[in-house]
Image (tube, helix red, strand yellow):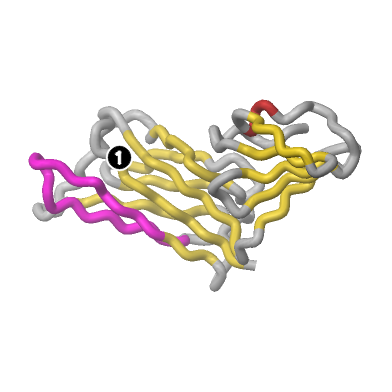
Amino acid sequence: MPPIASGKTIIYKSNCNLNPVATLLDLPLVGAENTLYIVKDTAAIYIWDGADYIVYDSRPYKVYTALLTQTGTDTPVATVLENTLGGTVVWIRDGVGSYSCVLSGAFLANKTWTSALYGGSAIAPKVGVKLYRFDNNFVVLKVFNELEVALELQSEYPISVEIRVYS
């Protein structure tokens, strides 16, 4: 099965010939054994082993990077920029200004690093965000403003989140 699409340009290398392939979605469902795919602007390469893609990443961590938006009290919507955690991350709204990122067993103790940043707006220039590991299954995002009244995420001003899990 080919890897999930990321929209990144890849370079296909076979028999020392370089042929551009538009996106990860354009990887063939099957390929010649040991066909190498190099993903532009990432540290990942994909090798077809005759049955499935083997993904190699030179970074010492797995990463989830996304932009979060929300309308009213709806569940947050994540525009996923990169996910190498090995599963689908689910976002849940726990209450006003409180959200959970869920992926079973993914967030290891003493190996998980988190970062969040609010883009800001003229309406709410002093919004604070805190992203932290809760346990192996959850990372929690708290959003608050200077009046300690939670501000729901606004679609035009997403919150950037990055979660790294080191080996």
Q: Position of residue 136 (x, y in %)?
A: 57, 59
* Residue 157 location, quadrant: top left
* Residue 20 location, quadrant: top right
On screen, residue 146 above or below 72: below
Q: Which residues are magenta?
A: 115-133
Q: For this view, does 114 lie left or right of residue 126?
A: right
Q: Position of residue 101 (x, y in %)?
A: 47, 47
Q: Going 80% across and 44% down the picture, which residue do you hit? A: 16
Element on which disc 1 rests: loop
Q: Going 51% across and 39% down the picture, which residue do you hit? A: 90
Q: Position of residue 141 (x, y in %)?
A: 36, 52
Q: Residues within 10 Å of mark 1 (few under 14, many from 20)?
A: many
Q: Position of residue 95 (x, y in %)?
A: 32, 42
| Magenta stretch encompasses residue 86 | no
Residue 38 or residue 123, whichever sits in front? 38
In the picture of the structure, the residue carrying the numbered disc 1 is: 158
Q: Going 19% across and 46% down the picture, which residue do you hit? A: 120
Q: Quadrant of the C terminus?
A: bottom right
Q: For this view, does 74 lie left or right of residue 14?
A: left
Q: Amino acid at mark 1?
A: Pro
Q: Quadrant of the N terminus?
A: top right
Q: For this view, does 129 lie left or right of residue 64?
A: left
| Magenta stretch encompasses residue 126 | yes
Q: Going 46% across and 40% down the picture, which residue do you hit? A: 91
Residue 88 or residue 156, whichever sits in front? 156
Residue 81 or residue 140, whichever sits in front? 81
The extreme front residue here reads 17
Residue 54 or residue 76, whichever sits in front? 54
